[in-house]
Amino acid sequence: MDNKIYDISIIGGGPAGMFASYYASLRKLDVALIESLPNLGGQPQTLYAQKNIYDVAGFPKISGAQLVDQLAEQMNAFPCDQYLSTSVTDIKREDDLWILSTNKETIKTHAIIIAIGNGAFKPRKLTFDYDPSIEENNLSYFVNDMEEFKNKDVAVAGGGDAAVDWAINLNQLSSSTSLIHRRNKYRAMESSVENLNASTVEQLSPYIIKDVTFNSDVHSKIDILLKKIKSDDEKTITVDKLLVNYGFISDSKILRDWNLDLEGPFIKVDQQMETNLPNVFAIGDISTYPGKLQLMATAFSEGPMAVTRALRNIYPDKDYFQHSTSLFN
Ligand SMILES: Cc1cc2nc3c(=O)[nH]c(=O)nc-3n(C[C@H](O)[C@H](O)[C@H](O)COP(=O)(O)OP(=O)(O)OC[C@H]3O[C@@H](n4cnc5c(N)ncnc54)[C@H](O)[C@@H]3O)c2cc1C
């Protein structure tokens, strides 16, 4: 792919970038899709693969992982070049082209669609030192496969929506589930808290985790040392799995050096998703405009708008808009 010049390079392979890459390929454009993680899917794949989504058109109920599978299957009809485990670090204008620097190769392109969500995200980790090998089997910050929690003693740490929902969901297949939270009140939807209170999840609050160590008798288990807030009370629970849901730190700071017009951490765009830079567009969670909703339903419409505008900019003589019913032949 060395000397290739793409029509559009899409930075970020979450739902917004996946659908935009499909739509651009459907419109017969030469597309590169660049994703910093080893797999596509963004937040629904990484943060809530097994949770159900109820507000994507055409799917009354679909899990994060299933939605990503559907997007990937759709993309197979019009494949594009995918650069996985590749992070874009800089963009530069050279003549009429954009040059993307990455941790691997350099990519040349006429137009860019930035679809990086909240930026490259990392989980907020436990703040004390622990044996890193605990992360191999016992401690996780994501749920990749619920089956790993089946018939296990599980502790979930956190007090937000994700922690409460995971405690309820994992409790359906675990042997036991505890939810550890430093406050008595959760930052979660009322209905979720009602479900939690009606469940058999043991609520350990207000407690913080002070230490996590391998259990000295059963090395496959871990001991979690808990300290009660504003008290000297401490207790230890022994579990197979600890899922920490303290939220995520996203890093979109690189954007500051790209000369984009920003509003807080977001990229300002016009009605056609165009930024202040020529042929640079932004879609999905990273883009902002009056009335913006950070929903996938919104992102799925922003992709075609950005692609169509880019197509008009790059090939002003081309017939702009056709329905997919005419294109899919
Ligand atoms: C717990 C939870 C539940 C949610 N539930 C719903 C719901 O029910 N309905 C709904 O519509 N929305 C929901 N959302 C929001 C939805 O997931 C987001 O709106 C959606 O993921 C945004 O898609 P995106 O492609 O813009 O960004 P993301 O999904 O964040 O994807 C961005 C991708 O860009 C990559 N990236 C970042 N920086 C770079 C870089 N420099 N180079 C290369 N790649 C990069 C990232 O690795 C990531 O894969 C939920 C979110 C969460 C956290």
Image (cartoon, rainbow, N blue to C red):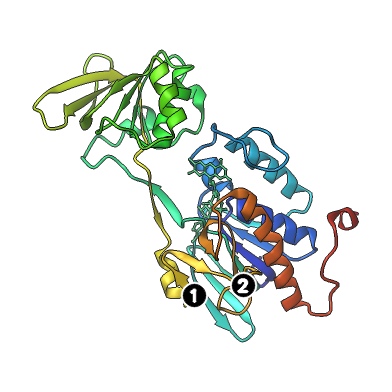
Q: Is residue 120 left or right of residue 44?
A: left
Question: Considering the image in quadrants, where does the N terminus appear?
Answer: bottom right
Task: Assess disc 2: are there few (<14), some (14-19) or many (≥20) residues with their C-alpha within 10 Å of its C-alpha.
Answer: many
At numbered mark 2, what does the secondary structure look like: helix, strand or loop? loop
Q: Give the mark nearer the N terminus: 1 vs 2.
A: 1
Residue under numbered circle 1: 260
In this view of the protein, can residue 165 be seen by the observer? no
Expressed as whole percent of the image width and height from the top left, the position of residue 149 reads 45, 22
Q: Is residue 8 left or right of residue 237?
A: right
Farthest residue toward the left? 232
Residue at point 47%, 78% (across, down):
259
Between 86 and 302, which is closer to the camera in this rendering? Answer: 302
At numbered mark 1, what does the secondary structure look like: helix, strand or loop? loop
Question: Considering the image in quadrants, where does the C terminus appear?
Answer: bottom right
Q: Is residue 60 left or right of residue 216?
A: right
Expressed as whole percent of the image width and height from the top left, the position of residue 171 reads 44, 19
- 251 lies above or below 50: below
Q: Is mark 2 within 8 Å of ligand 1?
A: no
Res. 152 image quadrant: top left
- 82 lies above or below 290: above
Q: CA distance from mark 1 to mark 2?
A: 11 Å
Residue under numbered circle 2: 274
Task: Assess disc 1: are there few (<14), some (14-19) or many (≥20) residues with their C-alpha within 10 Å of its C-alpha.
Answer: some
Expressed as whole percent of the image width and height from the top left, the position of residue 132 reads 29, 37
Residue at point 41%, 13% (across, down):
175
Give amino acid for label 2.
Glu
Give amino acid for label 1.
Leu
Farthest residue toward the bottom? 95
Res. 246 image quadrant: top left
Expressed as whole percent of the image width and height from the top left, the position of residue 288 reads 53, 64
In this view of the protein, can residue 95 be seen by the observer? yes
